[in-house]
Image (cartoon, grey):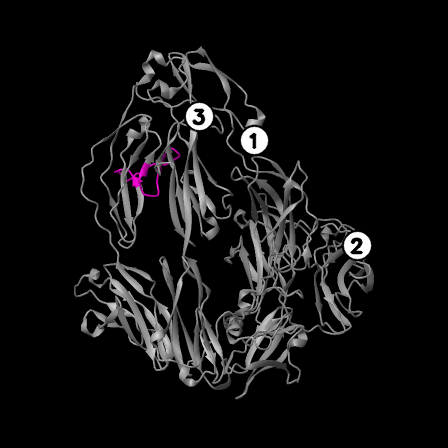
Amino acid sequence: MEGQDSDGDTENITQKKRIQQCDRCRHRDQRLPPGLELSSVREAQLQRLEAAGPRGPGRREQGPGLRMAGQQPPPWVHAAFLFCLLSLSGAIEIPMDLSQPPTITKQSVKDHIVDPRDNILIECEAKGNPAPSFHWTRNSRFFNIAKDPRVSMRRRSGTLVIDFRSGGRPEEYEGEYQCFARNKFGTALSNRIRLQVSKSPLWPKENLDPVVVQEGAPLTLQCNPPPGLPSPVIFWMSSSMEPITQDKRVSQGHNGDLYFSNVMLQDMQTDYSCNARFHFTHTIQQKNPFNLKVLTNHPYNDSSLRNHPDMYSARGVAERTPSFMYPQGTASSQMVLRGMDLLLECIASGVYVQSAPPLLAILQEDGVGVVHDLPTPDIAWYKKGGDLPSDKAKFENFNKALRITNVSEEDSGEYFCLASNKMGSIRHTISVRVKAAPYWLDEPKNLILAPGEDGRLVCRANGNPKPTVQWMVNGEPLQSAPPNPNREVAGDTIIFRDTQISSRAVYQCNTSNEHGYLLANAFVSVLDVPPRMLSARNQLIRVILYNRTRLDCPFFGSPIPTLRWFKNGQGSNLDGGNYHVYENGSLEIKMIRKEDQGIYTCVATNILGKAENQVRLEVKDPTRIYRMPEDQVAKRGTTVQLECRVKHDPSLKLTVSWLKDDEPLYIGNRMKKEEDSLTIFGVAERDQGSYTCVASTELDQDLAKAYLTVLADQATPTNRLAALPKGRPDRPRDLELTDLAERSVRLTWIPGDDNNSPITDYVVQFEEDQFQPGVWHDHSKFPGSVNSAVLRLSPYVNYQFRVIAINEFAIETYLLTLSPESNPSDVKGEGTRKNNMEITWTPMNATSAFGPNLRYIVKWRRRETRETWNNATVWGSRYVVGQTPVYVPYEIRVQAENDFGKGPEPDTVIGYSGEDYPRAAPTDVKIRVLNSTAISLQWNRVYSDTVQGQLREYRVRKPALGPA
């Protein structure tokens, strides 16, 4: 790589490090304010640690996540903290050795459909102390299991097993079941489980007469499948099990019927059989096939065909405006539940002028040419008073169906489909009403109180119609329960004051409307428990330098204890600055440094006592490949050596492996794998490809990739870099900052290749962003034999360092950068539909991210209007701009950004919104017969403003002729 002067183009500067020095730490109190209710404590959750992409120079594929910026380490680094991460998002749990009411842990789904060939299983599992006992109701009556020899309950479980090995009909057990789990502290309930047996009835026997239809007329072949449970999957095939080809003219509706917008002679070439596939039995039932008989006037030998303006008129099929085959009429209505998919469908008959691109079918009869259009109406979808939701709307079945996923209340309204042909258009309006089964706004959670404390259970749900709320206690309506002076019911809230041990119970909230119900259990447990630690004592946690990590300290007590962390027995509480304590007891260290190594003690305290635990934290050096394999070109039969030299923490076990083309490399007898290299003897063509060195320990890894190109002749292997003449040095790489102190830091780098001219000096420069941002200053100069130095720092300065390598030819810089220094490539803007533009790009790889949370700022604006830029932030590699005019040029920019800043200003590219069918077909079509085998066809070009896209071609087609 060619070097640059220190003040040259910064695009070759690929790494940057920022250090903030300050005289005092900034503390931020994130503990709950006094008076915050216990339910809010339980709901407090940690935001997920944002993933940070790996960085590194050159061909490095994935860095080890060891930089000072706090990158995300590999997945296995966090294995020791899995429980900690899970517990951050869960409610407070009572240890199982303490008395507690039952909690349902597993149950069957509300609508439980079972296979009649298997034994029936209705699940109900619960925990509690003492262990709960179980009983069931069926259709709201006690279900006496002991009286039915086929029914049993699993040991230490409430799961029902209904055994049919000795006979019996599963249908006899259909009904609504509910499980009750009970101990001396209360009763928990399962959902009401509706048990249904799967059904796959046979198709009724029927003899189908041939279906006679006039050519060009519409036709519907009805399926009418037997009513299975669950509903079968419908598809159409011939009696010989060949699939029926579907297109805009012939397609299957959502109801399973097969629709022909207009019938053609070719439709007689097969028969049509509706097939139903049933889920549980995995069987396919086939209906007797339909046979078509298409009537035609055989116009091809009729002299009246000559110079006729339209093929269909000549064949006795009258042109007409489209008419709807489904749904009937001009208006209909549809109801859909919130969260479900809305499917709207319009299927029309008629003759349609195909328009994009113009398709001209040519028929030659006695030297006379006739031009006609291909059949099929076109369907378009609209919403009155607004736009279709571009992020949820999908067109299916050749545009005949509109699907809107995950429907919400704002999707209600009037939609209409428009069917068009050259004779006119018709519309069908569908009024959509969105209703909602109950959904949670605030689901009641278990309440753990100490004697004398206050608390509340809240049960808030929404729906359409608005759901009603019913409270129960231990499975009985609350109004029929014994009075409790410490309990007050206020609609959707139960308030407890001065709770006592006798207040323990399980409360149920049932919220329902005509579309469904929700049932939640929440117990009230009153405990007097001193603090206790729930994890193993004296754990050892090993982490990689500069990573972010969490130390776990799960605890319990009632009243809820306060928790504090200390390091190495010191008296100051760890919270603020580089530390943060979460409500579940976890201590987050935002960036691990060497001085963070030591023994951490967590102390939980309440009025009944205190408990403590210790965690020993060891900080390990990162694993780095400091001499990476290089791209090589070798001739067949020669020997190639790929280097991979690694620096790692000596206390960790290092494993070096190789991949070829991203798959594990088999080390055969022509290869030799050594500690720091891979040698390939007698190189062959199959050895060509990418080779990746993977250096890993149990805590981290580093990757480096090179490409081997194999030439045909036998000769001495050629290293592409070895033959270079003397020149500028390659850039120093892998800058690392360690040993950070109040007024100093150690900067280490790996020298680049000197390119046959020894490096004489290294110059360390710095930039600060407060007084002279953008100006680089010399900090220190070191001999060419040095690659590590201690730098003195001034307080309260944001430093950015770079290292310049100097030889007799030039200087080369290498900068450790936090913000991206490049932007994604191959930016394009193309329409995927007529009213949108999809902006795509090739995403940047991990070595270009240079920091955590890589994302892209997408900007666009109409080219000719020079309007204000629109923008969006995207984490993927595409963004769809909706509601655009047809085929309009846009200016587009895509800029990379991470948590430390934006990349350079991106280039502007030109994209176009989606194309639509041309609004006009060629006119004045003329045919001249040249001889018995050739004709000349001429037409007037279409105007450019009617193309609505890029005019690619005029296409002429000659259709297959029917029987004479």
Q: Locate residue 431: give its quadrant.
A: top left
Toward the left, the furthest residue is: 167
Q: In the image, which residues are magenta?
A: 236-258
Q: Nearer the viewer, residue 441 or 571?
A: 441
> Pointer 2: what residue?
6
Q: Label 2 is placed on what type of residue?
A: Ser
Amino acid type at image mark 1: Gln
Give how far apart the Cα atoms at labels 3 and 2 are.
69 Å
- Is 245 magenta? The answer is yes
Total numbered circles: 3
Query: Which residue is the site of mark 3?
Result: 422
Mark 2: few/some/many CA within 10 Å (<14, 14-19, 20+) = many
Q: Earlier in the sequence, mark 3 or mark 2?
A: 2
The residue shown at (22%, 31%) is 210
Mark 2 or mark 1: which comes first in sequence?
2
Tell me if residue 440 is in the magenta stretch. no
Q: Position of residue 522 (x, y in %)?
A: 41, 73
Q: Which residue is mark 1?
A: 950
Q: Is residue 277 visible?
A: yes
Label 1 – label 3 distance at C-alpha = 23 Å
Q: At x 21% / y 48%, what residue is drawn?
A: 202
